[in-house]
Image (cartoon, rainbow, N blue to C red):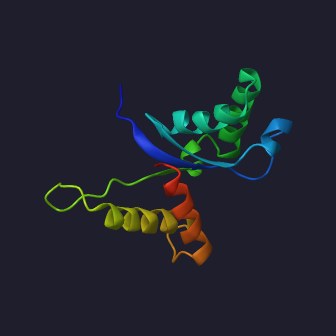
């Protein structure tokens, strides 16, 4: 079994042809063992009908040309050079910055993207 990792999932706003999808939150955080599991956790947390949930995940995969990683950001583990944990404020700041850069597509993040990354990371706690 693969190691569980913290993920932030940001799904597209456009619908996938299922009414319940348009009503559900498009962002979520989870701990999962794979990208597919992470997307599934966010969808099934909000969609109680398992069949509709499977349809949504399948259509999301089709929209991403089979690559669900398009919707998922892995929360980086940040440690000191010697492998020890950083103090919590420093770790949060580094993770927040890394996620904001991901949200900005590798460019300099906007204030909005920094705030979004902060909110998403805080929901992991």
Q: Taking 60 as reference, is 80 above or below it?
A: below
Q: Quadrant of the N terminus?
A: top left
Q: Which residue is rendered at x = 53% and y = 51% of the image? A: 123
Residue positioned most to the left: 82
User: Quadrant of the rendered structure where residue 94 is?
Assistant: bottom left
Where's residue 106, x and y in %? 49, 69
Q: Which residue is rendered at x = 48% and y = 46% of the image? A: 7
Where's residue 112, x and y in %? 62, 72
Q: Which residue is rendered at x = 50% and y = 39% of the image? A: 35
Q: Taking 21 as reference, is 101 above or below it?
A: below
Q: How many marks?
A: 0
- Inspect this view and state whether residue 18 appears: no
User: Quadrant of the rendered structure where residue 91 is?
Assistant: bottom left
User: Quadrant of the rendered structure where residue 103 is?
Assistant: bottom right
Q: Taking 125 as reference, is 60 above or below it?
A: above
Q: Nearer the viewer, residue 2 or 122?
A: 122
Q: Nearer the viewer, residue 68 or 2?
A: 2
Where's residue 65, x and y in %? 64, 44
Q: Which residue is rendered at x = 60% and y = 47% of the image? A: 28
Where's residue 56, x and y in %? 73, 34
- Inspect this view and state whether residue 82 appears: yes
**With 81 as the anchor, is 117 left or right in this view?**
right
């Amino acid at each position: 079994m693969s190691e569980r990792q913290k993920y932030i999932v940001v799904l597209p706003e456009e619908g996938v042809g299922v009414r319940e999808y348009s009503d559900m939150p498009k962002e979520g955080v989870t701990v999962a063992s794979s990208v597919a599991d992470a997307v599934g956790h966010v969808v099934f947390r909000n969609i109680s009908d398992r069949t509709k949930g499977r349809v949504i995940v399948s259509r999301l995969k089709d929209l991403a040309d089979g690559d669900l990683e398009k919707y998922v950001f892995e929360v980086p583990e940040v440690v000191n050079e010697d492998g020890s944990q950083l103090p919590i404020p420093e770790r949060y700041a580094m993770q927040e910055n890394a996620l904001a850069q991901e949200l900005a597509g590798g460019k300099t993040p906007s204030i909005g993207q920094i705030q979004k990354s902060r909110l998403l990371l805080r929901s992991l706690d």
